Each structure stands twice: as C-alpha cells, then as structure tokens.
Image (tube, rainbow, N blue to C red):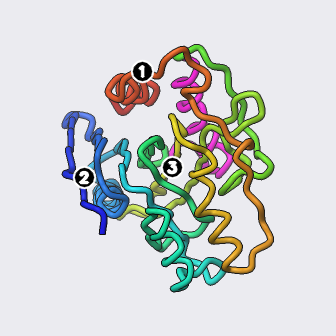
Amino acid sequence: MMKVPSTVELTRTMTKRKNRIIQLPNTTVERAFEKESELLKKVQQNTLQQALLLWQTPEPTVVLPASKKWLATPELIDQLHEKGWQILSRRTGGAPVPQVAGVLNVSHMYVWDTDQPYSISDSYERFCAALQRFFKALGIETEVHATSFSYCDGDYNINIKGQKVVGTAQRVTLGQQGEKVVLAQACILLEADLEQLIYPINLSNALNHIDEQVKADAHTCLADHLASLPSEQSLYQQLIQAFAPVA
C-alpha cells in the first residue's frame, strides 16, 4: 500500500463575486474528486457563481469511467499494482485516464449565462480559449482538434504541432432554479514518461477486449517545448490568470 500524501489546500475566495479558486498540488485522486463534487454542489445551490480547482497527485492512478466497457477485473488490478498503479472508478462516462505527478488537472465550474443559449460547442470553445491563453503566455501556439491514437480522444484536445498536450471533458447539470451549470475538465501533460503514462490505458483495453491502441508519440508534454519548466506555483498562477474572470 502506497503512503497517502498529506494534502495541502490553498483557497482564495472572492465573496463579492462568489468565486472560488482552490489549489491541491499534493492530493489523492479520490480527494480531488470529493472537492470537485463539493464545489459543484455549491455552484448548483448558487452559493458560488463559479469555481476553479487545480490539482495534481503523486500517486500513479488510472481512473476508469462508469461503463461495462472497462471493468476493474482482479487481473487488471493485480497487474496495475505490480507496476505501482492504483485504480479508481468514477461515476461519469468517457474513457480511462491516467493520473501521475506530471499531470495538472483543471476543473472549471460555473453557471451558464442565461442571456445566451447553451451549446456544447460554445462551452467547449470557451474552455479551450482559456487553456490556449495559458499556453500562449508561455510562448506556445496550440490547435484544438482530435488526436489519433491518444487516450480519451476528443474533438477538443489541445495540441502542439499535432500532438496532444491537453485532454478535455465536460458535463452539464442543473442548478436549483433550473439554470445550466457547466463542469469543464482538463488534464495538462506537464512532464511525464509517456510510455509509462499510457501503460494502464492499453492494459485496461487489452484485458477488457477492446481493440484500441494508444500510442505514446501521439502525446507531448509542456516541458518538451520550453527551455525549462516554470515552478509549480508559477504554472498555477498562470492558469488562474488564463481564467481571469474567476480571479
């Protein structure tokens, strides 16, 4: 059993605008999901207008979606544990996602402006625009499109020269007054061993008889495009600035 790290939580609240920013730079995936659910509930209850959650985990963990397509079989659990991976199931859809220390996660929760009709594409584009501002501030140009052979592929990946550096996801719930509440999520590859990163995904596919092959070279890390990777806190601050309306 791996030692659970102590969790450092840094919170900033803007009470006037009912916005909140929380940073969990050293947490478990389970704890991060609990905090995300807590914040989402507050947005649904109109206690908050929006919230930004930034987190990383030092524990290699693969997150399986709530689907009969990917099952946490005893064989899968045993083989993952042999390689130092934890496994966690989540009640949402999608595809398996690996979490390691070099992956920075972003969850943005907010009430959709009732003056504008909601659309999936508009909300994704809004989210991707903020992420692209983060990369542009670092001098990196990005594109938004699907990426063949990447894990959890989607039309709204952030790519650098055709390689996926960010995966995104989104779901919509309702607030107390029936207003739409958006939860947008991103996984940013900062610095990771890509072969190690995709191992649990291909293993999950193989043991669940899914004929999908994920390739390491379909991905890239932020560190590969900078002379040196900024400090963790600097990256967090730059992301906060990219989502400026929350700050």
Task: Give the left or right position of residue 214, taking residue 30 as reference.
Answer: right
Dot 1 amino acid type: Pro
Identity of the residue drawn at 77% across and 34% down: 162
Identity of the residue drawn at 41% across and 49% down: 109
Identity of the residue drawn at 73% across and 36% down: 163
Q: Secondary structure at mark 1?
A: loop
Label 2 packing within 10 angstroms: few (<14), some (14-19), many (20+): some
Task: Give the left or right position of residue 114, taking residue 43 as reference.
Answer: right
**Disc 2 target residue:** 47
Of marks 1 and 2, which one's residue comes earlier in the chain? Answer: 2
- Which part of the image, by quadrant, shows the N terminus? bottom left
Identity of the residue drawn at 45% across and 55% down: 181
Of marks 3 and 1, which one's residue comes earlier in the chain? Answer: 3
Q: Is residue 50 visible?
A: no
Q: Main secondary structure of the magenta part?
A: helix
Of marks 2 and 3, which one's residue comes earlier in the chain? Answer: 2
**Disc 3 target residue:** 184
Q: Secondary structure at mark 3?
A: strand
- Residue 218 placement: quadrant: top right
Q: Secondary structure at mark 2?
A: loop
Residue 54: % across, % down: 37, 42
- Residue 209 placement: quadrant: bottom right
Dot 2 amino acid type: Thr
State yes or no: residue 149 in magenta.
Answer: no
Spatial distance from mark 2 to mark 3, Cα to Cα?
19 Å
Magenta residues, start to end:
114-137
Dot 3 amino acid type: Ala
**Disc 1 target residue:** 230
